[in-house]
Image (cartoon, coloured by chain):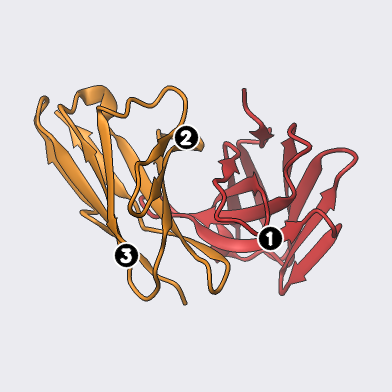
């Protein structure tokens, strides 16, 4: 049972445009959500997180939106840069504890020139 | 910031041998570490939660006798793949929690290839 889903395995966006990566979850008990960026043969790197008490969190070019009623979150990258090309994983867990995370299947973002 | 080191970064072994992967928190103490594995083009799947000074907690479907986890100190957890087979070939990643900073940091991963 995949509790965290990323339905788009890949996404291609032109440099300078907005990249929108989507993630859906089924477990309503999750209250903390994170986005990670991963290059091949490397571990994931934390990008941005959001707790369930918020619906938006912004950090530079990265913004995460959370829609609790729809159990949906999205990561917006604007403007997209070639260096953003990577696999992006969303993850869900429980805030405030050393909790295990449940990861989505990832979306491969390709930013083209 | 918090740094987690994994060693080796890649290893090739013969079928039937055992392989040990180390996960170290370099500048913080981690009472809890997590071990994940990732097959190509798939998600990171949690294998087990490693607790310092006690037994690891394994996820459903993960054989505890095959994937031995030892968390002997606050900065080191090891994963030993015993009697490795080709189907154990995967990318193994650990993560550790820096409780003082409330940050979860991942290691760079270890690629295991079993011939």
Q: Position of residue A89 (x, y in %)?
A: 59, 47
> Which numbered circle lies on residue B41?
2
Q: Position of residue A24 (x, y in %)?
A: 74, 37
Q: Which residue is mark 1?
A: A49
Q: Which residue is mark 3?
A: B75
Judged left or right of residue A63, residue B99 is left
User: Which of these two is toward me, A33 or A20?
Assistant: A33
Q: Which numbered disc, 3 or 2, marks the residue closer to the eye?
A: 3
Q: Position of residue B62 (x, y in %)?
A: 38, 27
Judged left or right of residue A104, residue B92 is left
Distance, label 3 to label 1, CA atoms, is 25 Å
Label 2: chain? B
Find out whether the residues at labels 3 and 2 contact each other: C-beta distance under 8 Å.
no
Secondary structure beneath label 2 = loop
Residues behind callouts 1 and 2 on a single chain: no
Residue B67 location, quadrant: top left
N-terminal label among 3 and 2: 2
Q: Which numbered disc, 3 or 1, marks the residue closer to the eye?
A: 3
User: Which of these two is toward me, B63 or B5?
Assistant: B63
Residue B13 location, quadrant: top left
Q: Which chain is red?
A: A
Q: Which chain is orange?
A: B
Secondary structure beneath label 3 = loop
Label 1: chain? A
Q: Residue at x 86, y 44 (%)?
A: A68
Distance, label 1 to label 2, CA atoms, is 23 Å
Q: Is residue B59 above or below residue B75?
A: above
Q: Residue at x 67, y 49 (%)?
A: A94
């Amino acid at each position: 049972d995949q509790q965290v889903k990323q339905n788009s395995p890949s996404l291609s966006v032109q440099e300078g445009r907005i990249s929108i990566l989507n993630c859906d979850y089924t477990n309503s008990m999750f209250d903390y959500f994170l986005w990670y960026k991963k290059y091949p043969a490397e571990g994931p790197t934390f990008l941005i997180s959001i707790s369930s008490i918020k619906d938006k969190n912004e950090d530079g070019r990265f913004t995460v939106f959370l829609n609790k009623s729809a159990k949906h979150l999205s990561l917006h990258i604007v403007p997209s840069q070639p260096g953003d090309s990577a696999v992006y994983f969303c993850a869900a867990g429980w805030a405030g504890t050393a909790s295990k995370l449940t990861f989505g299947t990832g979306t491969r973002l390709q930013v083209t020139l | 910031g918090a740094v987690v080191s994994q060693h080796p970064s890649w290893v090739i072994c013969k079928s039937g041998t055992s392989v040990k992967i180390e996960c170290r928190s370099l500048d913080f103490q981690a009472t809890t570490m997590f071990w994940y594995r990732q097959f190509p083009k798939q998600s990171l799947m949690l294998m087990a939660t490693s607790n310092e000074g006690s037994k690891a907690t394994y996820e459903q479907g993960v054989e505890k006798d095959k994937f031995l986890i030892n968390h002997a100190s606050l900065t080191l957890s090891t994963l030993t793949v015993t009697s490795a087979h080709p189907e154990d070939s995967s990318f193994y990643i650990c993560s550790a929690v820096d409780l003082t900073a409330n940050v979860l940091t991942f290691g760079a991963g270890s690629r295991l290839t079993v011939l």
